[in-house]
Image (spheres, helix red, strand yellow):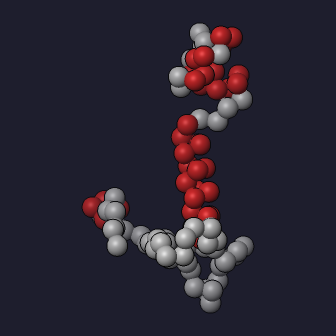
Amino acid sequence: MRATKLVLTVKHLMYRERLWRSKLPTLKYRRIRGDMIEVLKILTGKYDSNVTFSFEKKNQDSRTRGHNLKLVHHRCHYDLRKYLIVHE
């Protein structure tokens, strides 16, 4: 938000208007995109093989469409487990 205020022509506008005029994505979008890129790097083996991550790929025998990088999505019934971070 601060960097967009440095542009003198859009300094007086609201945040969303500054982004729209500068043709920039929002911070939320950039964070989600960065996370997706990191997950792709992990799944394709771009990181050190000695490092373990807690992603589980779907079984190839299951009926998945598209590609072989599908992840298992564990559903939870309570909010208590939804926000749990597992350290291995």
Q: Quadrant of residue 18?
A: top right
> From the viewer's perspective, is residue 46 above or below residue 50?
above
**Which residue does the image show at 72% across and 73% down from the upper left?**
66
Give the quadrant of residue 27. Answer: top right
Q: Position of residue 31 (x, y in %)?
A: 54, 45
Q: Is residue 41 left or right of residue 72?
A: right
Determine the residue located farthest toward the bottom in the rendered image: 61
> What residue sits 41% from the left and 70% below the top?
75
Name the residue located 58 percent from the left edge and 17 percent from the top edge.
5
Which x, y percent locates residue 41? 61, 64
Q: Is residue 55 above or below residue 20?
A: below
Q: Residue 77: tell me if it is visible.
A: no
Indicate left or right for 55 with 41 as reference. Answer: left
The picture places residue 88, in percent across and down from the top left corner, at 34, 73
Q: Is residue 36 visible?
A: yes
Report the number of discs.
Answer: 0
Image height check: is 39 above or below 65? above
Residue 58 sits in quarter: bottom right
Horizontal and vertical percent position of residue 36 = 59, 57
Q: Residue at x 64, y 71 (%)?
A: 44
Quick one: 8 or 15, which is closer to the camera? 8
Residue at the extreme left: 80
- In the image shown, does 54 or 26 lie closer to the viewer? 54
